[in-house]
């Protein structure tokens, strides 16, 4: 047997001839496959295979996005603003967010602002459809457990607000977006929401023929719309609009949105866009994830696509050594009144409301992209015998609290904990909605308290109301 010094192997001629090409091919396959397998293993399903960007612009559709600035409440009244990648924010981006919980040391908060290539902050080049916030190290959704006291919201100006009760947010987060991205200079048509409101489209005119609360079943024919249900479902969250087209719809795909007074937009889930072929008999029926009372107008523009991307490893400014005191007690005083919504600013900037109902009034609940809602019974059960308590906390997903009910003398009547008794708990990334059926007639309930943490019976009994809190 001879030794081939060039190949570095010994053996038959066919082995020496094919070994090197086969080895190269195997290494090439491994080199191409491992990154794909690694990426698949490392990116959880919640990322939906979106492309990640770190420290640079994200090219999304016709626009490029970047992290403009990240602000963090320090728990002592101060705010620190950085660029999201460990450096100082640019002077033009060093804004002071008005919604950060600067005076609420028990609540950690960060605001993350995105910017489009137009270099302007605010709506115009894009609309945010959805935001997800993941722990930058574990890649888990921040509120995956539902009990962590974490939540996030966003506004039309492109600012994501992240909050956490009683503990620090992760040092790094992945911020995932689903957006519409628009071509600069394209036409935008806007008109009101009242019946008869219309807008000219050049080749036609689009008019609001009807606006109904909830989601309706219908049959559309050349003669018009035939409603198949007596009332709409989920009117607290959704609306149905009938649009009449006089003339033609311009060519191409068009995106339509319902617009609220604060600029927030609701987009139909199906269809994502409208076009001329969808108009039947000059009429178009669409569902919007926005209640009728919030809609102030509509907007039509060329379809901006639905793009997924995320910023990877966004660094939050360090909070420092400031600890977290216990959150204050929320206190409502319904004084036996039914269906009066009471609000508390004790957890500001979180919005908190409470209502009491006579009888057992809800049978489960439902939720969607526009919020959470309880399903109200046609007729309440056990009126005069029991009461239903409804508490909503917007801006966070949380469950670890204890509810105490007192009479007009401050005497403790009942203690309600998560998972105990009859009721429903609903939660998603930006809201918590809880109902409890209480074995007390409504007129006995004068005060409702929400205490952070799960209290034992002994701890609940040790709580007291001051004389000032009774009135």
Image (cartoon, helix red, strand yellow):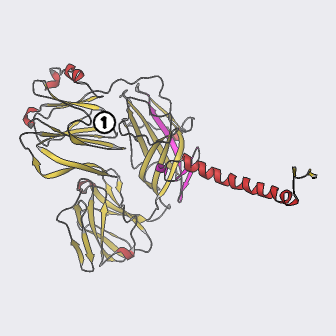
- Between 158 and 196, the one nearer to me in the picture: 158
Residue 190 in the image: x percent, y percent?
35, 63
Residue at the image point whose x is 73% and y is 52% from the top? 27
- Outermost residue to the left: 384
- Between 206 and 450, the one nearer to me in the picture: 450
Residue 12 in the image: x percent, y percent?
87, 57
- Between 348 and 326, the one nearer to me in the picture: 326
Residue 52 in the image: x percent, y percent?
55, 49
Mark 1 lies on residue: 399
Tell me where the magenta segment starts and ends, as one range: 45-74
Residue 206 in sight in this render: yes
Q: Is residue 382 left or right of residue 185?
A: left
Is 127 colored magenta in this rendering? no
The answer to which quarter of the image holds residue 90 is top right
Residue 198 in the image: x percent, y percent?
29, 68
Is 70 colored magenta in this rendering? yes
């Amino acid at each position: 047997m001879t030794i081939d010094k060039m190949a570095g192997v010994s053996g038959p001629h066919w082995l020496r001839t094919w070994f090197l090409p086969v080895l190269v091919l195997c290494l090439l396959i491994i080199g191409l496959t491992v990154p794909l397998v690694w990426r698949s293993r490392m990116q959880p399903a919640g990322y939906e295979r979106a492309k990640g960007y770190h420290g640079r612009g994200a090219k999304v559709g016709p626009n490029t996005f970047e992290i403009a600035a990240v602000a963090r409440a320090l728990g002592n009244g101060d705010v620190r603003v950085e660029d999201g990648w460990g450096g100082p924010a640019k002077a033009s981006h060093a804004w002071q967010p008005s919604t950060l919980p600067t005076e609420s040391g028990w609540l950690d908060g960060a605001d993350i602002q995105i910017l489009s290539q137009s270099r302007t902050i605010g709506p115009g080049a894009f609309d945010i459809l959805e935001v997800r916030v993941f722990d930058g190290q574990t890649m888990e959704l921040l509120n995956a457990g539902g009990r962590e006291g974490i939540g996030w919201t966003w506004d039309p100006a492109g600012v994501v607000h992240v909050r956490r009760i009683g503990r620090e947010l992760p040092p790094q987060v992945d911020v995932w977006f689903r957006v519409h991205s628009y071509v600069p200079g394209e036409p935008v048509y806007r008109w009101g929401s009242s019946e008869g409101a219309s807008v000219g489209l050049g080749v036609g005119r689009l008019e609001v023929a009807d606006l109904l609360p909830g989601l309706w079943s219908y049959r559309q024919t050349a003669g018009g719309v035939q409603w198949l249900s007596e009332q709409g479902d989920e009117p607290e969250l959704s609306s149905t609009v009938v649009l009449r087209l006089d003339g033609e719809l311009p060519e191409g795909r068009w995106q339509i949105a319902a617009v609220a007074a604060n600029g927030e937009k609701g987009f139909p889930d199906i269809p994502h866009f409208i076009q001329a072929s969808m108009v039947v008999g000059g009429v178009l029926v669409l569902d919007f994830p926005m209640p009728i009372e919030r809609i102030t107008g509509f907007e039509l523009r060329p379809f901006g696509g639905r793009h997924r991307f995320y910023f990877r490893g966004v660094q939050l400014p360090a909070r420092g050594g400031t600890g977290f005191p216990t959150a204050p007690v929320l206190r409502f005083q319904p004084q036996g009144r039914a269906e009066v919504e009471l609000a508390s600013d004790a957890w500001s900037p979180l919005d908190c409301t409470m209502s009491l109902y006579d009888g057992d009034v809800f049978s489960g609940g439902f939720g969607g992209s526009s919020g959470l809602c309880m399903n109200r019974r046609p007729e309440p059960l056990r009126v005069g015998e029991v009461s239903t308590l409804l508490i909503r906390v917007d801006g966070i997903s949380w469950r670890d609290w204890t509810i105490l009910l007192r009479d007009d003398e401050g005497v403790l009547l009942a203690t309600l904990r998560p998972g105990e008794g009859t009721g429903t708990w609903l939660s998603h990334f930006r809201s918590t909605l809880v109902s409890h059926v209480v074995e007390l007639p409504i007129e006995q309930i004068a005060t409702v308290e929400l205490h952070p943490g799960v209290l034992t019976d002994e701890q609940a009994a040790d709580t007291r109301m001051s004389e000032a809190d009774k009135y």
